[in-house]
Amino acid sequence: MATLSVAAILAENARRRPDKEALVEGDLRLTFAEVWQRARAQAGALTGLGIRPGDRVALMAPNTAEFPQAYYAIAATGGVVVPVHLLLSPSEVEHVLRDSGATLLLCHPAQADGAAAAREAGVRVVTLGDELDKLAADAEPLPSYVTRDADDPAVVFYTSGTTGVPKGAVLSHFNLVMNATVNAFDANDIRPDDTALGALPLFHAFGQTVSLNSTWRAGATLVLLPRFDAARAIELMVREKVNTFHGVPTMFVALAAAAAGADALPGLRVCISGGASLPVAVLERFEEAFGAKIYEGYGLSETSPAAAVNQPVFGARPGTIGHPLWGVDVEIARAEAEDRVELLPPGELGEVVVRGHNVFSGYLGRPEATAEALVDGWFRTGDLGTKDDDGFLRIVDRKKDIIIRGGYNVYPREVEEVLMRHPGIAQVAVIGLPDELHGEEVCAVVVPAPDATPDAAEVTEWSKRYLGKYKYPRRVEFADALPLGPSMKVLKRELRVRYAAG
């Protein structure tokens, strides 16, 4: 039986480059040997608390040094990490803990609500920092990590999903180690002397695989930023000579805006965008400000997460998500055929389907949901896209977000791309609202650019020049900010509820 552990990512670095700087957070600077020593000591403490291979341990912490240490400590015991989103309500935290069957929560002192929710669910809480450090100091460190079968669960990610309660996507050691490896060495050229900014939440699949695991898989340095603020991020990147940045579109928007007021800008070599679609106008603004290329990618919690990305070897094409990762197939299937996967030729619009070493084992304790998602050996993503003759993939929209106005399909993403070029618009989300005459009406929710006061009628008139008659927004609403979910995606369902009443 093949064996593997996510913990090997850290353990092998401690063996190969023990004195190399691994982790920077504020004034704290740790080498790979030091992080691994701390993780083994904590693993000894967890074993003392009764954690055995296969046990699920919840982890709730911001991007501080405590997160990676505890993450690799849990992996070293053979336990399964259940990362908890920091933006969940106490009842949602309770759902994640009960549903996952976690017996212990490792909780950052700043997350008091999470600790209270855990106690409510009858789950033991150990506070990261003083409490866990004391237990680790008294424990016998594990000599190394506990080896697992490659297909054993390593992490359970709770996906917010567009419907119903969050489901736990079970990812194996093989899923995560392969995704980190091909991200580091095949999709991107990550080198040991690189320094990456860890600004994406590590409790989320994108931050965990691409920022933490891929950076360390290559033996590079990770600089943590606990709270993202564009001006502070630029200062920190300049100070620490960061050359690798992973972000979601909202971060690229903020960085492009903050660049003008910065004393100096970092020399960025690798910039990766994911988590949501990146408007081409934002990509252009950022690349102009920083003189760096953005490689946009695509993935889901269920695909470890990376499935496709613009890669230097194939060239980057703005507005696309590039090519499938090494060893992964990403194709377009007939969206209406739900019980089977019927692949479509290049150029056709359909549902994006994925198969390969990155596809999850299933949803924890939900065989029906798993059977719906995994069909004929493919994972059905629920996203609509196309693949061109050169193999470049393009996401058109979520199947559930399409607006049907007067019988015509309107793809919000296409309308958003156009509106993002309006000089008075900083951010926009396009949604469909119920309409008696047309079934649905196109509504643009706009966050105005600083010092701009766009007018609703003017935005509609402006958009008519670039969009077909059935596509342009008849309704324009203004907001100070767009509601973001824990993974920094715009929560369109919240916007639909908010504006449907109006």
Image (tube, helix red, strand yellow):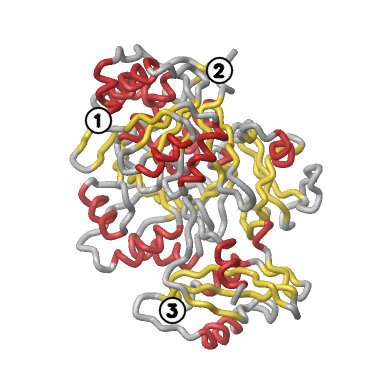
Residue 20, numbered circle: none
* Number of numbered discs: 3
Q: In the figure, is residue 13 to the left or right of 134?
A: right
Disc 1 and disc 2: Cα gap in Å?
33 Å
Q: Foreground residue, 227 or 270? A: 227
Q: Give residue 474's quadrant in the image.
A: bottom right
User: Mark 3 — residue?
Assistant: 423
Residue drawn at (61%, 53%) of the image: 162
Q: Position of residue 244 (x, y in %)?
A: 35, 46
User: Mark 2 — residue?
Assistant: 149
Q: Foreground residue, 57 or 425? A: 57
Depicted 456 relative to depicted 489: above or below: below
Q: Foreground residue, 382 or 22? A: 382
Q: In the figure, is residue 296 to the left or right of 66?
A: right
User: Mark 1 — residue?
Assistant: 130
Residue drawn at (34%, 80%) of the image: 451
Quarter of the image with the C terminus is bottom right
**Residue type marked 2:** Asp
Element class at badge 3: loop
Quarter of the image with the N terminus is top right
Q: In the figure, is residue 125 to the left or right of 95?
A: left
Disc 3 and disc 2: Cα gap in Å?
54 Å
Q: Position of residue 386 (x, y in %)?
A: 68, 55
User: Does residue 193 appear in this view?
Assistant: no
Element class at badge 1: helix
Viewer-nearest of discs 3 and 1: 1
Q: Position of residue 435 (x, y in %)?
A: 71, 76
User: Does residue 68 appear in this view?
Assistant: yes
Is disc 1 surrounded by few (<14), some (14 to 19) or many (20+) residues within 10 Å?
A: few
User: Which numbered disc, 1 or 2, marks the residue that appears first in the sequence?
Assistant: 1
Q: Position of residue 116 (x, y in %)?
A: 40, 40
**Residue type marked 1:** Asp
